[in-house]
Image (cartoon, helix red, strand yellow):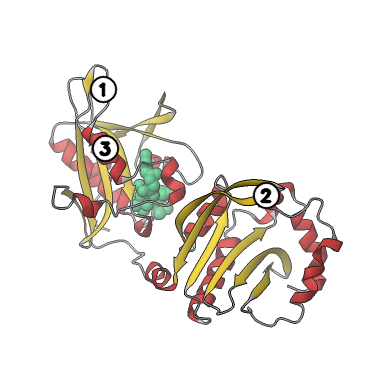
Amino acid sequence: MRSSDVDTLCAHRNETEVAATQDWPMPYVAGMAGWLSGQDRLDDITSGGRTHLAIDVGGEHVGELALLLDDKGQQASIDCTLSSRYWSRGYAREAALAVVADLVDRLGVVRITATTDPGNIAALRLLEAIGLVHEHEARLGVVRRGERTDATCYAVTADEWRAWRDRPQGSPGEVSLVPIDSDSAWAWRAVEGHWSQRRFVASVSDSYTDALFPDVWRGGRLVPVLLGVMADDERVGFLMYADRSPSMLSPYLWRMLVDRRHQRRGIGRQALRLLARRLLAEGNTHMTTTFAEGRGGPREFYLGLGGRVTGEIVDDETEAVIDLTTLAAEPVEP
Ligand SMILES: CC(C)(COP(=O)(O)OP(=O)(O)OC[C@H]1O[C@@H](n2cnc3c(N)ncnc32)[C@H](O)[C@@H]1OP(=O)(O)O)[C@@H](O)C(=O)NCCC(=O)NCCS
C-alpha cells in the first residue's frame, strides 16, 4: 500500500460491519494512518516488520492484507480486511490464497498464523478455505476496544499447506461404506470437518460417545449404526444412523461428516446413495435427518439429495425426510 491509499483505507475502516471485529479507533481518520508512509519505500514483503498489501479489484482499492513476518522470515501472520460492499464474492479468498502461496513457495516461510474473533464465521471460513487449520482458542487473548476478549487462532506449516494444496479435488474413482471395528475405530477419529462446522456436526469421537450411550426416543433407545466412508482407499468420511426400531419408524441419519480435505468432491452425495441402497434392501422406504441452519451449513446438500423439509423443528434443528428410492436410483459412479 502507499500513502496515496489513505482515503480508501479510512473509508473501509469506518464501515461499521468491517470495524466490528477489529481494534482500530473509530472514527478512523487520516491522521491515524501515518504508518502508511512507511509502506511507500517497500517493494516486497519484508522480514521483521509489517507489510500492508492493497486488494485491488478492477483498479479500485477494496481492502487490505496485513502481513507480519518475523526477523528470520520464517513465520508470518496474516490479517485480511475487505470493504463490506465486496464481501461474499471470493475476493478475500483469492487474495489471501495468493499471498499464502507466495509466502510458502517464494519466500520459504515455514509457518503461517492468523487470529480472529471466535464469532466471525466469515473469517473462520476464509482461513479454512485457504488451508489454515484451527490451532487453539486464546481465552482473553487479545484486546479489542480496550477490553480483553477471546481469540481463535489458526495456523499451518509450509508442509501441511503444500499437502492441502495438492490434495485430490475431483470426483473420486470409488466410494464405499465400510464397518468401523475395534481395529479401525481410532483411525476413523482422524476424519474431521472444519472448525467452523462444529456448529453443524459433532466429531467422530463425540459420536462414539453418543453411540455408547444412545438417547431414548419415544420410549425406545436409539440403535446406532456407524459406518466409515472410503474414497479411493482413503478414509474420507463418517456417518451414523439410528436404525429402524419399535420406537423409530424409519432410519434416522444422525451424523454425516466428510473430512475437510475431501468436501465438495461429491463424496457425501455418493455415500448417502450407497446408504440409501443398503436401507432399501433392508425394507425401508425413507430416512429422516435433522440439520442446523446457518451459513455454510448442510441445508443445500440435503435438499440437493431430494430431501423434503417437514416443517418440524427437533432440538432446534430442521427436520427433513429423504425418499430412499429416488436417492438410490441415480448411478453411484462419478
Ligand atoms: C455436508 C457434507 C456432509 C457434504 O458432503 P460433501 O462430500 O462435501 O458434499 P458433496 O460434494 O457430495 O456435495 C453435493 C452437493 O451438495 C451441495 N453442497 C454440499 N456442500 C455445500 C455447501 N457447503 N454449500 C452449498 N452447497 C453444498 C452442492 O449442491 C453439492 O454439489 P456441487 O458441489 O456440485 O455444487 C460435508 O460438507 C460436511 O461434512 N460438512 C460438515 C458437517 C455437516 O454439516 N454435516 C451434516 C450434519 S447434519
Q: With 251 as the anchor, is 96 left or right in this view?
A: right
The answer to whether the residues at label 3 and label 2 have Cβ atoms under 8 Å apart is no
Whether the residue carrying mark 1 lies under 8 Å from ligand 1 is answered with no
- Kindly identify which residue carries mark 2: 144
Q: In what element is the residue under mark 3?
A: helix
Tag of residue 209: 3
- Camera-side mark, 1 or 3: 3
User: Which residue occupies the foreground of this view, 332 or 102?
Assistant: 102
Counting residues from the start of the chain, the first of labels 3 and 2 encountered is 2
Q: With 329 as the anchor, is 125 left or right in this view?
A: right
The answer to whether the residues at label 1 and label 3 have Cβ atoms under 8 Å apart is no
Q: With 46 as the anchor, is 11 left or right in this view?
A: right
Cα distance between the residues tagged 1 and 2: 44 Å
Badge 2 amino acid: Arg
Counting residues from the start of the chain, the first of labels 1 and 3 encountered is 3
Q: Residue 133 occupies which quadrant of the picture? A: bottom left
**Residue 251 on image: x %, y %:** 23, 31
Cα distance between the residues tagged 1 and 3: 14 Å
- Kindly identify which residue carries mark 1: 216
Measuring 66% from the left and 74% from the top, which residue is drawn there? 49
**Residue 162 on image: x %, y %:** 41, 72
